[in-house]
Image (cartoon, rainbow, N blue to C red):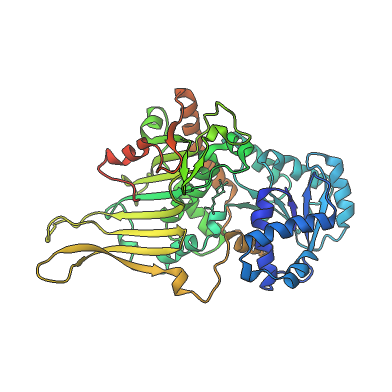
Amino acid sequence: MLVFGGTGDLALHKLLPALYYLHRDGRLHADMRILALARRAHSREAYQALAERHCRAQVARADFDNDTWHAFAARLDYFAMDASQSADFGRLGKRLGTNDERVRVYYLATAPDLFEDIASHLKIAGLAGPHARIVLEKPIGHSLQSACAINAAIGAVFDEARVFRIDHYLGKETVQNLMALRFANALFEPIWRAAHIDHVQISVCETIGVENRGAYYDNAGAMRDMVQNHLLQLLCLVAMEAPVRFDAESVRNEKLKILEALKPITGLDVRDKTVRGQYAAGKIGGQEVPAYYFEKNVDNDSDTETFVAVQAEIENWRWAGVPFYLRTGKRLSKKTSEILIQFKPVPHQLFGPGEANRLLIRLQPEECISLQLMAKNPGKGMHLEPVELDLNLAHAFRKKRRWDAYERLLLDVIDGDSTLFMRRDEVEAAWQWVDPILQGWQSYYESPRTYPAGSSGPEQAGLLLERAGRKWME
Ligand code: BG6
């Protein structure tokens, strides 16, 4: 496995710790080698020391031991090169040798503007043989046009079966459990439709700011960083029809149909159905934090959004008229990723006003699926209250360590299974829906709404639901 961007945050914080765990659990082939690539000059030992520091910080203390680390580090090497320079790929080729029989995974943990160069340089250097696979990190491009250009350039070198567009949300255990819940239980299917569901909320709220990714983030913003990929993928899994088989093509065909059925948000709808925000100074966990535009490598008068709320609609038979409210933001009061399915109230309220059923699927911080039902409060009289029927997944499977999303996805790449990766047409369909919203924001010359760090986002996000008599689940 060759990791471009080997000294970056993603490689050090996510990929190497995930590979360490896979190694520790005996899931990597004995001959597997990991070569980190980046511009900086590092000796092999210096890189291993850097990797160790990060792995120690990311891996649970009880799971890290020196012997395992040394055995893992023996797989790990470093090669300094400039991925934009074709000549450096010649040097890389010499370093790798000519053994083309082995599966070779190129993991592009770099900015998307390097993807096209890397793919073509790999081809010219003769490094993209039939056993080579390429992994692309999201976001793929900056717009539909740039995504198409990247996809075309990658497609000219690697056929689609060897392209793995990663969205780590698809590797999260509860996200896959959502498919199990829907397609392995008969209970929900009959009511999983507009006739019984009032609306759906998908919230991915974070407390962190942009950390040391200011340069990337200021160019991307929450729409490209989160909505175009993670939130739309979650929406697809909630809304898609049951695939014929659980394989890459069947699952992705169904997701694509949902993306294509998303009602375009254009013109004045951009104002009515979307809210973008940017955090001002505030407090997170009692600590003062600066406003977004004071973050490192962020423009002082940046109008990049760090919060987005959107009211999406899916124009098909199952979902016509059901709003899907999407919300994501940085520097919010709590870190949670949740999907809420709000059912409609009973047609006749026998016991007086009561709350309608809701199903909560929580991905983070703890994984759980919980169904809110109305039950009688013990004692005289029919006093009803909402109670939770909980499926606590961490508890139900407590003997098993919870895998990080990257562990599963890296193993899938090695196995050549692309079920949990985004296909080219999916990525482009997602951009097709996102682009007009981004363009609308530009053409209105309206700055993002500010919200204090540590709050639940700009108040306009609340109004998006309140005007329809609904509210965000807090
Ligand atoms: C990444 C985004 O894809 O997902 C980050 O680039 C974000 O900005 C992260 O913080 C959130 O992932 P998770 O797994 O912590 O919810």
On the question of residue 27 being in view, the answer is: no
In the displayed structure image, the side of residue 114 where residue 289 appears, left or right? left
Q: Nearer the viewer, residue 184 or 325?
A: 325
Residue 52: x %, y % from top left: 73, 60
Residue 13, quarter of picture:
bottom right
Q: Residue furthest bottom?
A: 399
On the question of residue 167 being in view, the answer is: yes
In the displayed structure image, the side of residue 336 where residue 126 appears, left or right? right
Identify which residue is drawn at 46% across, 64% down: 177
Q: Nearer the viewer, residue 424 or 89?
A: 89
In the displayed structure image, the side of residue 110 where residue 465 appears, left or right? left
Residue 82: x %, y % from top left: 81, 42
Residue 182, quarter of picture:
bottom left
Quarter of the N terminus within the rendering: bottom right
Relative to 294, say whether 355 is above or below. Answer: below
Residue 298: x %, y % from top left: 60, 33
Residue 462: x %, y % from top left: 33, 40
